[in-house]
Image (cartoon, coloured by chain):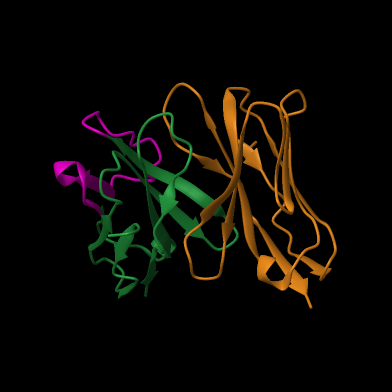
Amino acid sequence: GAGVSQSPSNKVTEKGKDVELRCDPISGHTALYWYRQSLGQGLEFLIYFQGNSAPDKSGLPSDRFSAERTGGSVSTLTIQRTQQEDSAVYLCASSSGQGVTEAFFGQGTRLTVV
Amino acid sequence: QKEVEQDPGPLSVPEGAIVSLNCTYSNSAFQYFMWYRQYSRKGPELLMYTYSSGNKEDGRFTAQVDKSSKYISLFIRDSQPSDSATYLCAMREYYGNNRLAFGKGNQVVVIP
């Protein structure tokens, strides 16, 4: 596709349920990022994938959060046993590689935990 | 102290005014400095970036970086209603991981 695609665009889930958020990066982009944006909190880094290197997971807030990237393309962010404080917009971005400054963002998945 | 500080207060200006936004940071390893613009319910999009200290101009937009003060600015001249958006500063190190550290963003409203 022409840009970064995220699905679903909106997700409402009950507290305690698991959710999966999907990101389709721009074709050929080797770098992929997940960020979380809460009201008034800016963008919080979660995880970064670069090619076949081990991902940088330093931003994941707890072990309930995990992410994988299959075949160097599509990525899935999984949140287990969701809590109300997980409610936020989850943004995915991709870029064409290390040293490249521009990251292209998707429109995000708005997660609401009730 | 957060790595990147951006006073998140909203800003309302009349059309044609100059908008001034700024961020401070604490990590002296930051080398790339960016401004992203985010419209409501959209993902951020890159507006401008600069490498190290200096100024960069692009149309009505000017970005300034002062590494000695760890301070970056964005100026929007002759502001238009279409400039109404949230502006986020972002920065990253040259070496090391490629995560972008963001400020909290400023919501700018340009009143016609």
Q: How many numbered marks have been drawn onto this rendered protein structure? A: 0
Which chain did the renderer colour green? A
Q: Colour of chain B?
A: orange
Q: Is residue B104 visible?
A: no
* Residue depicted at 31% across the width and 69% down the height: A15
Q: Residue at x 51, y 51 (%)?
A: A43
Image quadrant where one finds the C terminus of chain A: bottom left
Identify the residue at horizontal 42%, vertical 65% (top origin). Answer: A87
Give the quarter of the image for residue B56.
top right
User: Which residue is depicted at the point 39% across and 63% down?
Assistant: A108
Residue A98 lies, in percent from the top left, at 38, 30
Q: Nearer the viewer, residue A93 or B56?
A: B56
Judge left or right: residue A20 versus residue A104.
Answer: left
Task: Name the residue furthest front.
Answer: B59
Name the spot of residue A88 as percent of width and height, x first: 44, 63
Segment colored magenta: A51-76
Horizontal and vertical percent for residue B85? 64, 65
Quadrant of image for the N terminus of chain A: bottom left
Residue B99 in view here: yes
Is residue A58 covered in magenta? yes
In-front residue for pair B67/A34: B67
Q: Main secondary structure of the magenta part?
A: loop
What residue occupies the far left of the structure in this picture? A71
Q: Residue B13 lies in magenta, yes or no?
A: no
Judge whether A90 appears above or below B6 on screen. below
